[in-house]
Image (cartoon, rainbow, N blue to C red):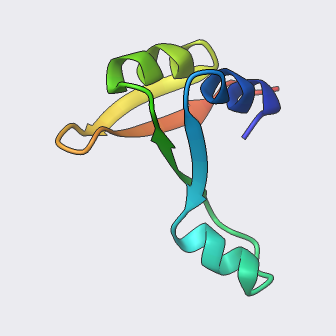
């Protein structure tokens, strides 16, 4: 994830890398995608932050799961 996105999120909350990509990195494999957990930011605010950096789609409303695709750098 782009450093600017990380900085914007971390100004207001905490960001953790989770899931299969962590396993893959520990096994020295290239992750196919990355999953993050964001704490300390309400869903609507996180969506606002992410929208500044790419496309955002709510795919799991019950748990606040977003599919995020950053803009090309």
Asked if 22 appears above or below 50 in the picture, the reply is: below
Q: Describe residue 32's horizontal placement relative to residue 57 as left or right.
A: right
Quadrant for residue 64, please give it: top left
Question: Which quarter of the image is occupied by the N terminus?
Answer: top right
Residue 17 screen position, x and y as percent = 61, 56
* Residue located 36% across and 25% down the image: 42
Residue 14 screen position, x and y as percent = 58, 39
* Residue located 34% across and 26% down the image: 43
Viewer-nearest residue: 22 or 16: 16
Question: Which quarter of the image is occupied by the C terminus?
Answer: top right
Viewer-nearest residue: 58 or 37: 37
Asked if 11 appears above or below 21 in the picture, the reply is: above
* Residue located 42% across and 16% down the image: 45
* Residue located 80% across and 32% down the image: 3
Viewer-nearest residue: 34 or 43: 43
Q: Describe residue 22's horizontal placement relative to residue 56 as left or right.
A: right
Residue lying furthest left: 62
Residue lying furthest bottom: 27
Q: Describe residue 52's horizontal placement relative to residue 60 as left or right.
A: right
* Number of marks: 0
Residue 72 screen position, x and y as percent = 75, 27
Residue 34 screen position, x and y as percent = 60, 56
Quadrant for residue 5, please give it: top right
């Amino acid at each position: 994830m782009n450093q600017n996105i990380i900085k914007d999120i971390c100004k207001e909350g905490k960001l953790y890398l989770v899931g299969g990509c962590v396993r893959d990195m520990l096994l020295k494999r290239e992750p196919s995608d990355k999953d993050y957990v964001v704490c300390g930011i309400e869903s609507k605010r996180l969506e606002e932050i992410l929208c500044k950096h790419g496309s955002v789609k709510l795919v799991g409303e019950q748990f606040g799961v977003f599919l995020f695709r950053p803009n090309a750098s």
